[in-house]
């Protein structure tokens, strides 16, 4: 299982916007792209997410969608 957190980046603050739990990396990627459809899908390949989780125990990416900045975190539930 994986936890997804999407936060809006406002000036010097990070404002939580969405949290969700999914069963697989592929579901996590789909869920992020549903919530942020304007985000670059290439930034969220299942392989990149899984490699990052294996290396540093989570995947973090700052993206711009609809003119706003967001931080996406996908991490395994422990």
Image (spheres, grey):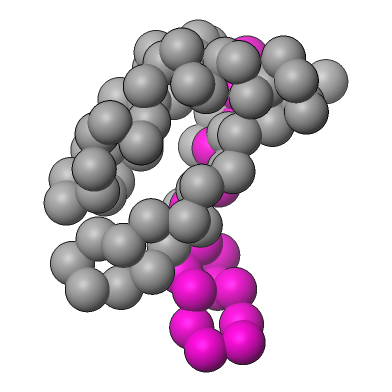
> What is the chief secondary structure element of the magenta stretch?
strand
Residue 2 magenta-highlighted: yes
Q: Quadrant of residue 68?
A: bottom left
Q: Give the residue at the far right of this rendering.
A: 78
Q: Position of 51 compared to 78: left or right?
A: left
Q: Please identify the quarter of the rendering in which residue 29 is found.
A: top left
Q: Inspect this view and state whether residue 50 appears.
A: yes
Above or below residue 53? Residue 32 is below
Where is residue 30 drawn, in percent x and y? 30, 25
| Residue 77 visible in rendering | no
User: Does the magenta portion include 59?
Assistant: no
Q: Is residue 56 left or right of residue 24?
A: right
Magenta stretch in the rendered image: 1-16
Q: Residue at x 55, y 28 (%)?
A: 21
- x, y percent for residue 39: 24, 48
Tell me which residue sits at (60%, 15%) in the image. Answer: 51
Vertical position of residue 66 compared to residue 73: above or below: below
Report the number of numbered marks. Answer: 0
């Amino acid at each position: 299982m994986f936890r997804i957190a999407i936060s809006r980046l406002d000036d010097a603050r990070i404002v939580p916007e969405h949290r969700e739990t999914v069963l697989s990396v592929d579901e996590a990627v789909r869920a992020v792209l549903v919530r942020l459809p304007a985000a670059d899908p290439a930034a969220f390949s299942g392989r990149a997410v899984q490699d990052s989780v294996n290396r540093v125990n989570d995947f973090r990416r700052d993206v711009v969608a609809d003119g706003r900045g967001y931080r996406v975190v996908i991490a395994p539930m422990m």
